[in-house]
Structures are given as structure tokens and as C-alpha cells.
Amino acid sequence: MRKFNGTELLIATHNQGKLEEIADLLKPFGVSVSSNADHGLPEPEETETTFTGNARIKARAAVAATGLPALSDDSGITVDGLGGAPGVYTADWAETPNGRDFVMAMTRTWNELEERKASFPRSAQFRCCLVLAWPDGHDEVFEGVMPGQLVWPMRGDQGHGYDPIFQPDGYDITFGEMDRWEKNKISHRADAFKKLIEGCFA
């Protein structure tokens, strides 16, 4: 596994919150970060059918545009009773002409499970894939998973996305009811970042 020994890393995102979170994680290693927005980069079209494939598209596009090493992520929820859907289309299920509506997406997810008479517990996983790409074409891939089950009705107003119907294994509350900092410690993204730090920075 290749260690990262540079001082500058491009985070292939326009999400300021995500940038700050990653900057904080990498601070102990003397790495300064910038985002797609800082470099005026557009969002590339995500045309792959896997989280790894889409994360790689984003990382490679950022490297090609700037010549800097880049880190990207792709994440979503996979529901066993729906054959792994929505998966890479997690955000697409929430798209409306007026922006994303995750209440609509969660309702659709539950209704489709009901139509299929899916058995209980209705297991699901939040997944995160990180790709760290270098200008010479090399990349390292790290995957994080948070297993759990879907519950209904929705519970809690913390978090975002599908959090109010996702109850992580070992807990009796949903991500939507969980303190943000507690969730961040156990999430799929935390799992992936732990592997990234151990693999490439520690």
C-alpha cells in the first residue's frame, strides 16, 4: 500500500462541511486540503454502477484537472430486500424538480419493501468508498460499512438523507435520533477513513 507523503491534497467535493471534516482528520499529518470549489472544478458525471467506480471517476477528474493528488468518496445505502437498491442511486431516488426530497425517497424505499413482502428485520447497510488517487495513475481504495436495519415510521430529525429510517446494529435508536458526533464516530464514513489513515497516512 502506498503512503501519502505530499503536503497538499485535493478533496474532490463541493461540500464545505465534508472538506472541514477531512481537513481536521488530516491535520496531524501536516497535509493541507483544498476542494473542487477552490479550483473551480465542475462535478463530473457519475456513470459507474458501483461506489468504487463513481469515487474513482471523481478522483481521476480532479487529478487530471489540477495535477494534484486527490481524494474522493461515494456513498449510499444498500437494502437487502431490494437487491441492494438504491445503492449508487441513493441520492437519485430523492431528486425532484425542486431539489432533493429524502422523505419521498424513504417512503418509496419502505413502500417497495412492503410490496415485496420483505421479511424482518429489513437489513440494510450504509456504505462509503474512498479513492485516493495520485497523478501517476496509482490509486488506493478503502471501503467502510455500517450494517443495520430499516424501521418505520421515520424517527428523529438529526442527520440527513435516510438517517431517520436506519437503525444501526447494536443500537435501539436511528441515525436520525443519534447525536451527530456519536454517529460520526461509528458511521460507514468513519470506518472508511480509519482504514485510509492507517493505510496511507499513519
Image: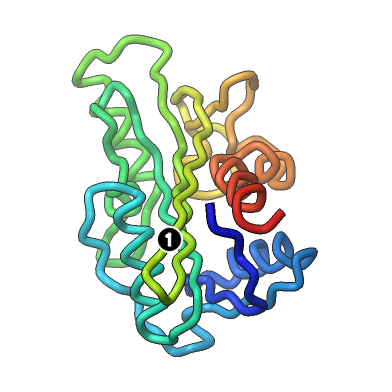
Q: Residue pushed farthest top?
A: 119
Instruction: Give how far across and how far down residue 60 sits, in percent.
Output: 36, 71
Residue under pointer 1: 139
Q: Nearer the viewer, residue 201 or 94?
A: 201
User: In the rendered image of this protein, does residue 132 appear above or below residue 1?
Assistant: below
Residue at x 25%, y 69% (from the top left corner): 45
Q: Is residue 114 left or right of residue 16?
A: left
User: In the rendered image of this protein, does residue 121 appear above or below residue 194?
Assistant: above
Q: How many marks?
A: 1
How are the colours assigned in the image? rainbow
The quarter of the picture where the C terminus appears is bottom right
Quadrant hosting residue 84: top left
| Type of amino acid under label 1 | Asp
- Disc 1 is placed on an element classified as strand
Q: Residue pushed farthest right?
A: 28
Residue at x 56%, y 27% (from the top left corner): 168
Instruction: Give how far across and how far down residue 135 sits, in percent.
Output: 43, 76
How many neighbours does mark 1 have within 10 angstroms: few (below 14), some (14-19), or many (20 or more)? some
User: In the rendered image of this protein, does residue 164 appear above or below residue 181?
Assistant: above
Residue at x 49%, y 62% (from the top left corner): 132
User: In the rendered image of this protein, does residue 198 appear above or below residue 25?
Assistant: above
Instruction: Give how far across and how far down residue 193 sits, in percent.
Output: 60, 50
Quadrant hosting residue 76: top left
Residue at x 46%, y 55% (from the top left corner): 140
Instruction: Give how far across and how far down residue 130 sits, in percent.
Output: 48, 54
Q: Is residue 111 left or right of residue 195?
A: left
